Image (tube, rainbow, N blue to C red):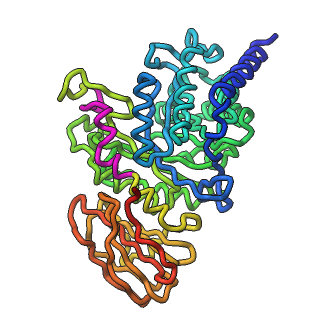
Amino acid sequence: MSQMAVFAALGALLSGALVGAVVGSAAQRELPALHVSADGRCIVTPEGDPFFWLGDTAWSLRAISPGDVDSYMESRSANGFNVIQVHCGYDVTDFAGARPFQDNDADRPNEAFWRNIDDIVAKARDHGIYTALVPMWGAEYGKAFGDDAAKAGRFGEWIGRRYAGLTHVLWIVSGEYDSINNFRLPITEAQKNVFAAVARGLREAHGGSQLMTIHPGAARTSSLDFHDAAWLDFDMLQSGHTIDCEAYALPESHTLISHDRGLEPAKPVLDGEPIYEDTPDGVWMGNGATKPRADAAAIRRKAYWAVFAGAFGHTYGHNDVYCFYEPEQPGLVRAELPAQRGSWRAALDAPGALQMKYVRFLCESRPFLGRVPDPSLVVGGPATGLDHVEAVRAEDGCYAMIYIPTGKPVTVALDRLKAGRIVAWWYDPRTGRARRAGRYDRNGEREFTPPTSGDGQDWVLILDDAARGYRPPGRRP
């Protein structure tokens, strides 16, 4: 029997064992399968309900004990997160010291390592969380396969079969795929073929039932190399680890998202890695750890900019959580970049992490399908830099939301809405609470002044058609 046939047989056997172990009698707990909406803008369930992706970069989740995985899942689920992004890896170890492959040969998976990934996948489902698996980082693909697309395809089919049939599994074909070429663009055709081979193997295994994307370096989007690929269900970008991308002459998340929304065919888009909370500004841009660290205000700003520019959700990250850092002693700052400085356990309750659910709650408080970005709502333009205002509305004009990052007054073209009378609300992204801001006729332009202003005093202005009777947006129990 050929090596490929042996590999395929082993993959099928292990896939069956996993489905029995992970699904088995717990099949009734499977999460709804996710699909791209008919208009190519959102992700939906089989019933057509929109899915708002609130993700967390749990890249190194494999490195902590099963008990700690439980604690992590419980915290994230309780705070509204419904997706975790998990890196499996090539040149890595898990909490028990197991490596993914015997002798670093991707044709020889190490069951001890992959059983731990199986457990993570199962725990995520039990907590109501989808798992976006990253088989390898781009540079790891280079080490594992070189230009050998056939070997890459065998690996893609093997890992795809292992998790085929699990409705809560999604795929990020590669993390920072351009790292296979030392972050130089464009990547070569041979390198691109390696990723395409893995994607084809995955697709052959799951038959198109699990969504797939790919994750680029900063500040870039997957659409640069893969938008037209049939296997790419949605675009993912990495806006990167800067508090203000434009200050570094880089495109901000809302710019990248707007760009991707203008492409054909229409595909959903998501910022899969903005700056992590408590990360030094521009830490990978030659600044080291000398700059101010991203606070909750920066985290909120990236999130609201992204979803109001047209993303179907958002991914959060924390500098101490993505790698599950534990300092050797309190107060010790890690010497290596990006200079972690606290326990991941404490960081689970960082202010920005606790406030991300309010983004999701707000977006889900009004009809999500058919929502369109509309910069023309803001008279005089949306401003630039940290003052950038982002506006979105229902396609039929029955409501609008305007994110104001520094609390400065905005003039709104009310006639862009379709309502006889408009009910206005101020929504506080820090607390998830709303306060009434008056009732107005849909006539001409009107200036709105947020309740507070200054750094970190961001607000969302909500304008509803009074006849729709929308409930005031606010915190959930």
Is 263 positioned to the left or the right of 300 in the image? right
Q: Position of residue 419 (x, y in %)?
A: 50, 85
Residue 189 seen in the figure: no
Q: Residue at x 61, y 18 (%)?
A: 106
Q: Residue at x 27, y 43 (%)?
A: 281
Does 474 appear above or below 153? below
Residue at the right extreme, as displayed: 1
> In which quadrant will I find the N terminus?
top right
Q: How many numbered markers are drawn?
A: 0
Q: Residue at x 54, y 17 (%)?
A: 113
Q: Position of residue 311 (x, y in %)?
A: 50, 56
Does 154 appear above or below 424? above
Residue 202 magenta: no
Residue at the left extreme, as displayed: 331
Q: Quadrant of residue 108?
A: top right
Q: Position of residue 111 (x, y in %)?
A: 60, 15
Residue 81 seen in the figure: yes
Q: Nearer the viewer, residue 434 or 340?
A: 434
Q: Nearer the viewer, residue 281 or 24?
A: 24
> In which quadrant will I find the C terminus?
bottom left
Is 184 positioned to the left or the right of 452 in the image? right
Q: Residue at x 44, y 36 (%)?
A: 73
Q: Position of residue 422 (x, y in %)?
A: 43, 83
Q: Which residues are magenta?
A: 336-356
